Amino acid sequence: MVGRATDMAPDVAIVGGGLAGGLLALALAARRPDRRVLLIEAGENLGGNHVWSFFLSDIPVALRWLVKPLVAARWDGYDVRFPAHSRRLNSAYRSITSERFDAHLRASLPEGSILTGVAVAALDRQGVTLADGARIKAGAVVDARGAQSFPGLLGGWQKFVGQMLQLEAPHGLERPIVMDASVAQEEGYRFVYALPFAADKVFVEDTYYTTSPHVERDVLAQRIAYYAQAQGWRVKQVLGEEQGCLPVVAAGRPVLHDGADGVARIGSAVALFHPLTGYSLPTAVRLAGMLADLPDLSGRAMAKAAADYARDHWQAGAYYRLLTRMLFGAAQPECSYRIFERFYRLKEGLIERFYAGHSTGLDRMRILAGKPPVPLGAAIACLLGGGHPLARLDDVMQPQTAQTGEVEQR
């Protein structure tokens, strides 16, 4: 625990020291140094135990200062591989490790601004009640605790196991393989993700789009070992591991709030992620910047601004939810890769805007134009609201865990 200052009476109390909460704390510390911020996290480390990766074009230029100190590795391009198509793209790609995230937060926030290893029993517009009964009064309260289930939503899951591998010899990768779908397609759309952190160190993740949230850790870990062997890599040691399950949304209605109770809610609990990729970092950065620049940082003002942002984000995601319906509702699981294989034949600028969630009208028409990579009848059924049944996303997700040291890519 750091700075057990329950008598601090901060201007802003942020509950949840993950990606959304941590970015907001950093933005407030930089933009509003006159305000006292308290970041409360149930775990011992801020940011958990993850690798977050993103395209630099995902982040508005005016907000790149917020993520720049967090970046642990950077590359000027990436590769994709499919059974009938491979491509090298020039978009800048970055990765943040939770270790660096934690260290930068502790270095950037004033002493006494962080409480870790502290469970929260309740919160309201006037403050936070800890599990031990202690009460922290606050001028504004932000709930950034995330979600374990998503009632009211339909779609599927992107589940994964990733390992940081120390190799016996250099791997030979010049840039990341962001999507290797040349591997056997099992359960649903499957791809492998490889990030070269050093000449002899690579982060490899086995990822599936599926209707089940269950992560078979041992199976996926074995497939990572097989993948490394197929690349000619000899693994000396597994330095770290993560596993997780991200929601991908096709339909429904999330649990949104109007901010009337005076508590600002941010993060995955209010569906602040890309509906098809599950990526949350770009949205978390934009929202942190917007909230930190509010002229009024009262609880009521922050709650309303966050609620408006979540509502607008949900409305803007309608097109991407349609694409998710195509992926889960129209494609046969073993043929789902064809959707992404076709997508990665399009122009690079279109691909960048897609991942950033800023597809133009022309982009949207181009993605859907031509012969669909799924059966035509199934595609039409999905466009009309039909197709194969979608999974309910109110199943409880397995928590992301780590069996060993170093390392929510997304």
Image (cartoon, grey):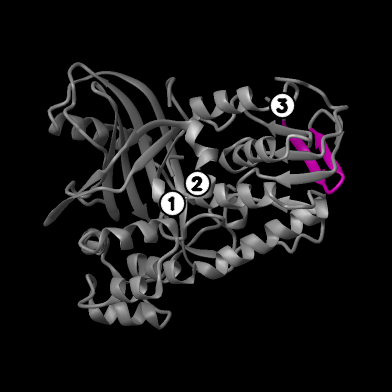
Q: Find disc 2 in the rendering and name its residue.
A: 281
Indicate whether residue 369 is drawn in magenta: no
Residue under the image location 21 percent in, 50 percent down:
181
Give the Cα distance between marks 1 and 2: 9 Å
Q: Position of residue 332 (x, y in %)?
A: 26, 65
Q: Say if mark 1 contacts mark 3, CB within 8 Å.
A: no
Q: Secondary structure at mark 1?
A: helix
Examine the image and state in which quarter residue 389 appears: bottom left
| Mark 1 vs 3, N-terminal side | 1
Front tag of 1 and 2: 1
> Mark 2 is on which residue type?
Leu
Indicate whether residue 123 is drawn in magenta: yes
Question: In this orientation, which residue lies closer to the viewer: 262 or 351?
Answer: 351
Q: Find disc 3 in the rendering and name its residue.
A: 115
Q: Find disc 1 in the rendering and name its residue.
A: 58
Q: Is residue 175 left or right of residue 354?
A: left
Q: Position of residue 56 (x, y in %)?
A: 40, 46
> Mark 1 is on which residue type?
Asp
Tell me: residue 312, above or below residue 370: above
